[in-house]
Amino acid sequence: MTNKLTESILLVDDQPANLQVLMNTLESLGCKLLVAKNGKTALTIAQKMRPNLILLDIMMPGIDGFEVCRRLKSDPDTQKIPVIFLSALDDTGDKVRGLQLGAVDYVAKPFQPEEVIARVNTHLTIHRLNREVQKQKDELAHELQVVSQLQRNLLPERLPRVPGLKLAVHYETSRYAGGDYYDFMTLPGDLLGVLIADAEGHSAPAAVMMAMTCALFRSCSTDLNEPASVLSFINENLCKVNRESFVTAAYAVYDTTRRILRIACAGHPFPILYRFSEKTATELPCDNVMLMGLAPYTDVPVSEITLYPGDRILFYTDGATDRFNTSEDRYGTDRLLHKFKTAASDDPEVILKEIVDDILQFAGDSPADDDQAMIVLVVD
């Protein structure tokens, strides 16, 4: 609980007698009482001392109470200080004007001491609670930023350099942290392992599943060149700790010498293949097994495809295709296929930028409600 001795109230009135009455009335609250006899002094004290509450007379020579309130509310340093007007003016229009300027209350003179004490206590309490809520929000925002950074630290620090292959990635979360994950593994025999995964949901729960998926993938020390073995290993261990969530994933191993891609999918969107020779973009026909984290697999089918110079592959999570616009239309796979097909460059970074820009243009003012991860591989 806040010690009232640490709270202060600024009393503003050009009449010394009124100030004395207010001080006598509020003395029992135990707060520090500050005094200003004009608007200019009130603004100076408010800026330097940041009182917890201001009792402000309206009719004062020079800068009147309305103008003092307006200046207080236009200054970021003082705009959150609650203001109670004290005035002999009893016109409804004056009360409305004061409230429109940002005052929280209005007490007409001559006032009753009990009424002033009650209103002051009420607004000190509200202000105190607001500060506590804001403090907790700031602490939570800081913690979420830390979580977000820790999660991004789990992603590859840099893309692998693979002869005969150009790579680019796009990653963004709809909130501070998310459940999308991608990773690469350079393997013996000129092989490259590519993993993309999507944990159910958003924010902290999904981030935990994403972190577990990362840990399992990087602890899988054997058979990394076998897509079926990798997905089986991750799934088996997720099943041991998971209760209500799941993860979709696709793991591919690319042989850079033979230009052969072998891929296994677990409930994940099919990768998109662009054939340079045919100028077509289609989904790779992969056999899917069920989502990871629900039950062990008995068998994981693996699809194999040969790539040629100029071909490109797009791995993605459903945050891209499930983006909606203000009319509740879905971006969808067809739009993604078309944009991947008509990309004006064979530079994977340019291709991804064109896709992201197209999604943003489609969505308009509709915010993203899911994470997005995309990987583009272009064969030289």
Image (spheres, rainbow, N blue to C red):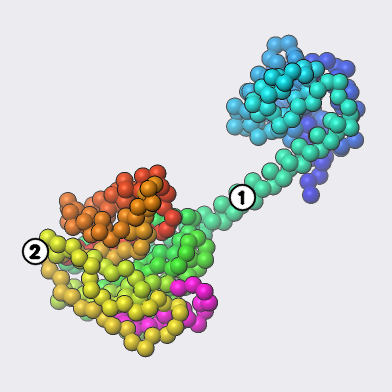
Q: Is residue 94 left or right of residue 113?
A: left
Stretch of the chain drawn in magenta: 224-246
At 42% from the left and 85% from the top, the residue drawn is 296
Q: Is residue 278 left or right of residue 98?
A: left
| Residue 348 in view (yes/no) | no
Nearer to us of marks 1 and 2 is 2
Please provide percent x and percent y for residue 339: 22, 54
Find out whether the residues at labels 1 and 2 contact each other: C-beta distance under 8 Å.
no
Q: Quadrant for the C terminus, please.
A: bottom left
At 59% from the left and 27% from the top, the residue drawn is 74
- Location of residue 39 by image quarter: top right
At 49% from the left and 55% from the top, the residue drawn is 176
Q: Which SS does the magenta portion mostly show?
A: helix
Neighbours of disc 2 within 10 Å: few (<14), some (14-19), many (20+)? few
- Location of residue 42 by image quarter: top right
Please provide percent x and percent y for residue 65: 71, 19
Q: Secondary structure at mark 2?
A: loop
- Mark 1 or mark 2: which comes first in sequence? 1
Q: Is residue 233 magenta?
A: yes
Amino acid type, residue under disc 2 in the picture:
Ser
Q: Is residue 196 left or right of residue 242?
A: left
Q: Is residue 278 above or below residue 109?
A: below
Q: Is residue 343 left or right of residue 19?
A: left
At 38% from the left and 78% from the top, the residue drawn is 290
Neighbours of disc 1 within 10 Å: few (<14), some (14-19), many (20+)? few
Disc 2: which residue? 277
State the residue in front, 289 or 206: 289
Amino acid type, residue under disc 1 in the picture:
Lys
Residue 137 - label: 1
| Residue 319 in view (yes/no) | yes
Q: Secondary structure at mark 1?
A: helix
Q: Is residue 315 above or below residue 90?
A: below
